[in-house]
Amino acid sequence: MTEYEAFAIELAREAARVTLPFFRSDIGHEDKGGAAGFDPVTEADKQAEAAIRRLIAARYPDHGVIGEEYGQDRPDAEHVWVLDPIDGTRAFISGLPLWTTLIALRQAGRPTVGVIAQPYLDEIFVGGSSGARLLRGDAETPLAVRTCETLADAVISTTDPDIFDDAERDAWTQVRATARLARLGCDAYAYAMVAAGKMDLVAETSLKPWDWSALVPVIEAAGGKVVNWRGAAPDADGQILAVGDPRLIDQALVTLKRAAI
């Protein structure tokens, strides 16, 4: 395990120390979405990101940070940590253990280390140059995507079809009609399941860098691939297609490309 992978795990464990006492408590939330729609944030989100930022500043004071709750600090640095302390706040406030902490390290603009952590289940999915693995308690298990040659055999996911505009929803509906099974409402935990070889494809839109940066190293170190709906590397357009078996990319893009930004 590399130095940065180990540190990302340390950050995830610090976030868990902060978030777990709030989960399934009487914690309230604010709606930061306004006219754009319900977008909750809790004290757990804020405190967890603040805790992560303190550890980064103490260990690597020259590194930059981009976080959902507290914005950017030196985003043009050679090393930049990209943070989402609670991805899936709607699940968090609903008592569902599908929320995750997402932590990525971007080097020269590219995510090279990623962590998807689910503290309530005591799971940390980590990916980087040393490979992909699941940490649970004292156990460490290698992660590997599964073979899925055709979309007709695939188990797929998106968080909520309502996130799509009309063209995107039409494209998703056609992909879903072809696939064997679709599961909704999993947020970033679905990407962890792709890396673990339990699901095959996730398609989403309107994602921010803190929503997708951690997913890339985890899935790709496990043998999968993450692209945008044009088939290129993920970027600011926020349209994400993640697959376990790379052969699924072209099959899904037949439809998704029609709605690509």
Image: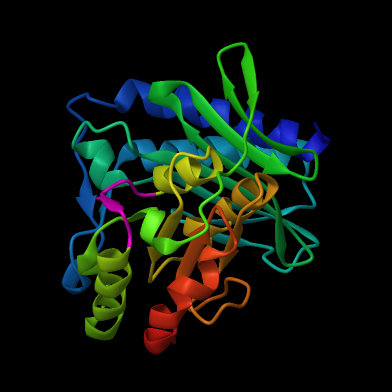
Q: Position of residue 255 (x, y in %)?
A: 38, 80
Q: Position of residue 182 (x, y in %)?
A: 28, 53
Regarding residue 238, the answer to whether it shows in the image is no
Query: Going 57% across and 35% down the picture, which residue do you hit?
Result: 125
- The quadrant in which residue 127 appears is top right
Query: Going 79% across and 65% down the picture, which residue do you hit?
Result: 108
Residue range (magenta): 179-187
Is 197 positioned to the left or the right of 79 in the image? Answer: left
Is 19 positioned to the left or the right of 228 in the image? Answer: left
* Quadrant in which the N terminus appears: top right
Is 26 positioned to the left or the right of 65 in the image? Answer: left
Regarding residue 167, the answer to whether it shows in the image is yes
Does residue 182 sit above or below 115 in this rendering? below
Relative to the observer, which residue lies in front, 168 or 150? 150
Q: Position of residue 193 (x, y in %)?
A: 46, 41
Relative to the observer, which residue lies in front, 195 or 105? 195
Relative to the observer, which residue lies in front, 11 or 59? 11
Color style of the picture: rainbow
Q: Is residue 181 magenta?
A: yes
Q: Position of residue 20 (x, y in %)?
A: 38, 23
Relative to the observer, which residue lies in front, 3 or 180? 180
Residue at the farthest top position: 138
- The quadrant in which residue 14 appears is top right
Query: Going 50% across and 31% down the picture, which residue do you hit?
Result: 15
